[in-house]
Image: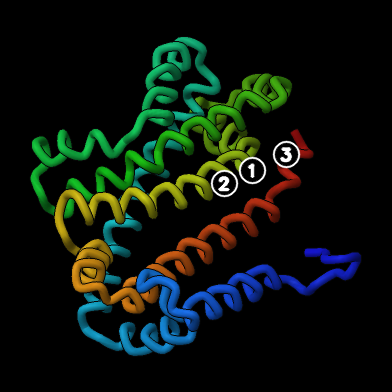
Amino acid sequence: MTVFGYRLPGMSSLLIWGLLWEVVGQLDLTFFIPALSEVISTLFTVIQTSAFQVALAETAYAFLAGVFFAIVIGIPIGILMGKNRLIDEMLLPWVNVFLSAPLTALVPVLMVLFGFGMKSIIITTTLFAIWIIILNARAGVKQINRSLVEMARSFGASPVDAFTKIYFWAALPEILGGVRIGVIRAVKGVIIGQLLISIVGFGALFELYSANFLMSHFWAVLIVLFALAFTISEFLAYLERRVSYYAAKR
């Protein structure tokens, strides 16, 4: 970040916003925003409680399971859509509809079909993440040089060989980009599921703290959630940069 011609070190913007947060909290302008120092102090207290550790385990389980199914299902479907015109024409309208639709409206339907337990939360998480993964995998396959595919066929590659050795690796930059965005959407999905379907995990903590006006506790848990999502996103962005040469080889 550059201010008045001076280049500030990385993460300076976060420090500036943190300072502003502290000032607003110390002025006591609203109960909703406590001082950042108070939130950080509360954070170290909260993470040591058994309630937080149980909530973290429940949220992590639903999140990881939802992302796993989104990746395992979404990437093959996206690759098939990219390489087969008929499948693409049949599925693309539905993928676009679900990507742009407010998926929260489907939560009551999932509750009726799958109950009020962890299964519905995992499915909700998967639905939030899968569509962008499908579209990015499809876009990656569309960018592949057809000569690579023709070369594989001329050497007698089976459909499985072409899938695992040509399509997947050539589309990998776009696939990782879709997974990174899907992970961010999955965070929204798991929290919405835990708030609307079954009050468990971080959703239960948010409900408890907001109902009792424990805003420093509320913001402490929210910071943990943001930090986890940001860390995963940056790790995937790092992997995305590491495999960017695949796009050049295409």
Alpha carbons under labels 2 and 1: distance apart: 5 Å
Q: Which amino acid does label 3 sit on?
A: Ala
Residue that mark 3 sits on: 247
| Residue appearing at x 59%, y 61% in the figure | 234
Find residue 59 and report its image quarter: bottom left
Q: x%, y% of residue 60?
A: 32, 64
182 horizontally vs 211: left or right? right
Q: Residues within 10 Å of mark 2 (few under 14, many from 20)?
A: many
Find residue 5 and report its image quarter: bottom right
Q: Residues within 10 Å of mark 1 (few under 14, many from 20)?
A: many
78 horizontally vs 8: left or right? left
- Locate the C terminus by quadrant: top right
Residue that mark 2 sits on: 176
Q: In this view, does 93 lie above or below 220?
A: above
Q: What residue type is labelled 1?
A: Pro
Label ID, residue 190: none
Residue that mark 1 sits on: 173
Q: In this view, does 136 lie above or below 227?
A: above
| Residue appearing at x 21%, y 64% in the figure | 207
Alpha carbons under labels 2 and 3: distance apart: 12 Å
Q: How crowded is mark 3: few (under 14 residues within 10 Å), some or many (20 or more)?
A: some
- The residue tagged with tag 3: helix, strand or loop? helix
Q: x%, y% of residue 131?
A: 42, 34
- The residue tagged with tag 2: helix, strand or loop? helix
Q: x%, y% of residue 7?
A: 85, 69
Check if mark 3's residue and mark 1's residue have beta carbons within 8 Å. Answer: yes
Check if mark 2's residue and mark 1's residue have beta carbons within 8 Å. Answer: yes
| Residue appearing at x 23%, y 34% in the figure | 106
